Amino acid sequence: MFSSPSAQWLFLTCLPRFGRARRRAMLATIPDLTDLLTRNPATLRAQGLHAETIAAILAWQQQNETDSSVKTVRQTLLACERHGIGIVNWQHSDYPEALRHIHDAPLVLYTRGDTRLLSHEQIGIIGSRNATPAGLDHARRFAAELSNRNLLVTSGLALGVDGAAHAGALDAGYATIAVIGCGLDRIYPNQHRRLGERVIGTGLMVSEYPPGTPARAAHFPQRNRIISGLSRGILVVEAGLKSGSLITARMALEQGREVFAIPGSIHSPVARGCHYLIKQGARLVDTVDDILEELGASWSLPAGRALPDQSATQPRSESLATGPLGALDSREIAVFEALGYDPQSTDALCSATGLPADQLVQSLLLLELEGLVSSAPGGFQKIA
């Protein structure tokens, strides 16, 4: 168990007194950090390592599982095996080259899904958790079209814009990558559990946190640097002036990525962050062509990267029929398609679907029982 490369890199993340700054400094002189694990105490002291770090390395060499770091590695490997979680270490062939060159790149990525997607050209889509219906629609539409134009959509699975972006790519028949701020044995937020399962089934979910790690506020800025680090550019759909999306956009600029922003109403609080970014030099976007023009170069992805047994040109209702709505009839599918990720009244849904109120309520009840829809103040909304 301890001889595998993943175990060795995982141990490096568990070493006491061997934080990110120390790892970065060491990587500048020792490209393969696992070499440290074979060195004698005198050599380790000469490299300036702390006594606690050296003691843990010696425990590793002796496979002494009474040492807390060695014990943590064993527990993490067993948990990964139990939950079907893969580990992509710094030297793994699937480790994304774009991410490797950012400041404070993670030594280890935990994965569920198709890790080959990490090497594909990506575009990050981020925005407000309290997005407007228009913002959610923008996220879905841009995600679908960017996917169709050979860019893989990456986001953070959060409520609002993130979830809409993932759903937009999936509903159009494409894979997507979700980067989350907790262990992959849980999906956060819980409202996106089904959406997360769809992401894993056809795309990839990524975290730098081992299984068992709960979601914490401090994890999300760290998660955001991975979203931007994986991507050629970041599209901000809606954002407040003091939002995490603006922090991610700043990280993207520091990483040398392009930043794009969709403008909105001057009266909307969730448009002010986008307007601020545009004033600071972000590219104003109102079509996908604006993004492709700025990014330039030809893409490395083949055209039509559809999900298994689906065509990128397949009608949306057919794609959904083979997914979460497969057990339901066309009426429920029509109601689901008419719903958004913000509450809609039954009157609005009757108008959108052409269904009488009694049939609409029956369909909403079936969708709610399937875990696809939830009732909320103001009506009903998608949760998948």
Image (cartoon, rainbow, N blue to C red):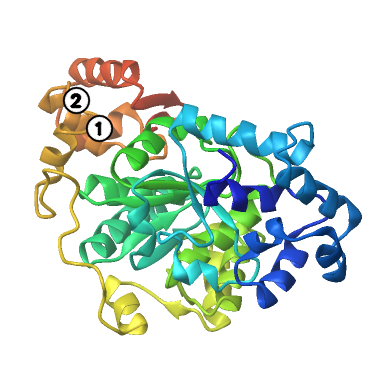
User: In the figure, 297 relative to 262: above or below?
Assistant: below
Residue 12 shown left or right of residue 188 in the figure: right
| Secondary structure category for the residue under label 1 | helix
Badge 1 amino acid = Phe
User: In the figure, 299 relative to 268: above or below?
Assistant: below
User: In the figure, 280 relative to 377: above or below?
Assistant: below
Residue 285 can be seen, yes or no: yes
How far apart marks 2 and 1 lie (CA) works out to 6 Å
- In this view, the residue in front, 159 or 49, is 49
Residue at position x 78%, y 36% in the image: 68
Looking at the rendered image, the quarter that the C terminus falls into is top left
Badge 2 amino acid = Glu
Residue behind mark 2:
332
- In this view, the residue in front, 268 or 78, is 78
Residue behind mark 1:
336
Residue at position x 60%, y 70% in the image: 251
